[in-house]
Image (cartoon, rainbow, N blue to C red):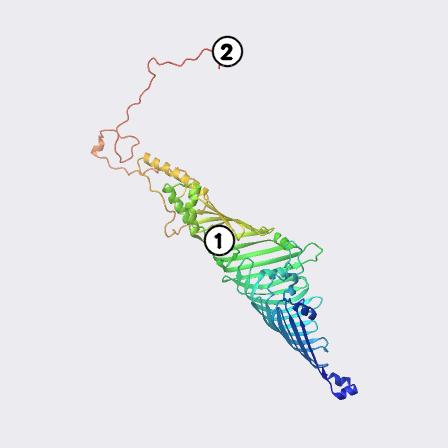
Amino acid sequence: AASPAAAAVRALDITALKRSDVTLESRLGSEQTAALLALLGLDRIAAAASGPARFESSLKGVWGAPLQVTATLAGAGIDGGVAGTVDPAADPFAASLNVTLRRADLSPLLGPKAGVMPLRDVSLATQLGIAGNAFTFDNLDGAVGGSRVHGRVALTRGDETGVDGQIAMDSLDVAPVAAIAFGAAGRDPSAPLERGWMRGWRGRLAFEAARAGLPGGSELRPVRGAIRGDGQSLVLEDVRAGLGGGEVTFDLDARQSAQNDGAGTSFNARVQASGVDGAALHYRGLAMPSGQVALQMTLAGQGRSASGLAGALSGAGTLTLSDMRIPGLDPRAFEVALRAGNSGQPTDNIRLKDIVEPVLSAGAVTVPSAQIPFAIRDGRLRVETVTLDAPRARIALAGGYDLPADQMDLRAIMSPVTTMPLNGRPEIRIDLNGSPDRLSRTLDVAALSSWLAMRAIDRETRRLDQLEHGGAPSPEMDELWDDPVPAMDPIPSPQVKVPARDPRRKAPAAKAPPRAPSPQAANPPTARAPNSPAGGATLAPLPPPIDIRPAPGALRATRPPSTTGAF
């Protein structure tokens, strides 16, 4: 519809006709929303549910000047509209639109990756500015998957996409974002990686999230940083996050080579953490004990697929623990085993395990400080034997985690640290094996049972030795520690040195000082035995030795006559 002046029509005044008011209105309907989206060219942006849809638009203005435009689209799974101005005569094309999307499913934007991010429930409002190939989204405010998103983004379309802006959100799931960035989203782990965010764009996008979920279940609160691209690489820079009351910093540089050179994708990363509460760190069913944790770690990998990257993962780091309280390792288990042995209870492996297990699992051991170095090679994290020193126990820890196989094996050998004398070294071994979701715990008390058996033999030997010398048996030790624990150095070495003197023998009594002779002592009635202790009772002299001879008439052995062939 147009309303030109009649004189301009009669005179065919093109200039005047161009200044006439023009109105263009359209109304489209369909029984299926998908058909209408395809007609409008929106089928690669939004997905439709089954049901009818209706589109209405209006374009008003003067030819050669910006036109007022309004449009609404309502259908199954989608509801939104735009209002603003467009200038089709401008070079380049320009538009300024207020876009409102009340409900939409934007999964087609991710193509086959639609299942990795929650784009099925999207709402947003923004001021969209268009100038040729440049698109600016100002005052962006919306929600994606229940998480609010706001900020500003500028896109430039061309041979390479230019990106610049800032995005803030309530929550972020790191795993699907990383899969999209590396080109692994929606693909089999053994399939070659796609281009992802490695190549094809330039710019810098700053981001901030109030909460970010890590693989395994831990959360960063908050996290901020920036993503930078130069057309050939993806760089995460200045990433800082809060974790369990501490701070984590993270840097990453990833590159994707040409698809025909066989190198695939490579990356280098660095992670640092300090002042983190161990209770905030967990990976699926495996949780870090409570205490302060610090971490320094480097990672690197190279591969053509997601499984290749995981299998080639390498790196190293150090985990520092402070005031770490480890449950399931109560040193009082040794004291309970010691009392059971002293009371004569059976201490075979099966019976001893039933005695020790409840006490061991009910308590915990506190490690004041420790450093645990680890290495990562071919996707396998390994911890060589490291010693954790606690006030009442020493724990030898070793094991690791196989990332491709998703299997963990961890071994802890605990022995008591006491200021009281111990012969030998009692030990309890705990093994954790299996997936982090289903770790099985195995208790081995064979070394402790052997130590109790040897101690029982030693105790009986000492008892008989004391009875032989006329002394009373000494009481048995039932406690390994005083309460509170004595403030002195523990046994420094795990090897117990054997003393020169047999510990089962009682030390000789100290000799009494000589006394002045008395008149009675000048003429003693009987002689004192040579081995009589000083100050003891006198004994009668021993009788003379007895000479034992054969009885008369006893048969004497004679040598048999020699016979040829006889032996």
- Residue flagged by tag 1: what amino acid is it? Ala
SS for tag 1? strand
9 or 506, which is in the foreground? Answer: 9
On screen, residue 360 versus residue 476, left or right, reads right
Q: Position of residue 282 (x, y in %)?
A: 51, 57
The residue that label 1 is drawn on is: 370
* Mark whose residue sits in front, 2 or 1: 2
Q: Is residue 62 above or below residue 398?
A: below
Pick out the residue farthest to the right. Answer: 11
Q: Residue at x 47, y 51 (%)?
A: 388
| Quadrant, the N terminus | bottom right
SS for tag 2? loop
On screen, residue 510 versus residue 388, left or right, reads left
Regarding residue 113, the answer to whether it shows in the image is yes
Q: Position of residue 480 (x, y in %)?
A: 39, 47
Q: Position of residue 148 (x, y in %)?
A: 56, 69
> Label 1 crowding class (10 Å Cα cut-off): few <14, some 14-19, many 20+?
some
Q: Is residue 560 above or below residue 248?
A: above
The residue that label 2 is drawn on is: 564
Q: Is residue 352 above or below residue 72?
A: above
Q: Position of residue 35 (x, y in %)?
A: 68, 68
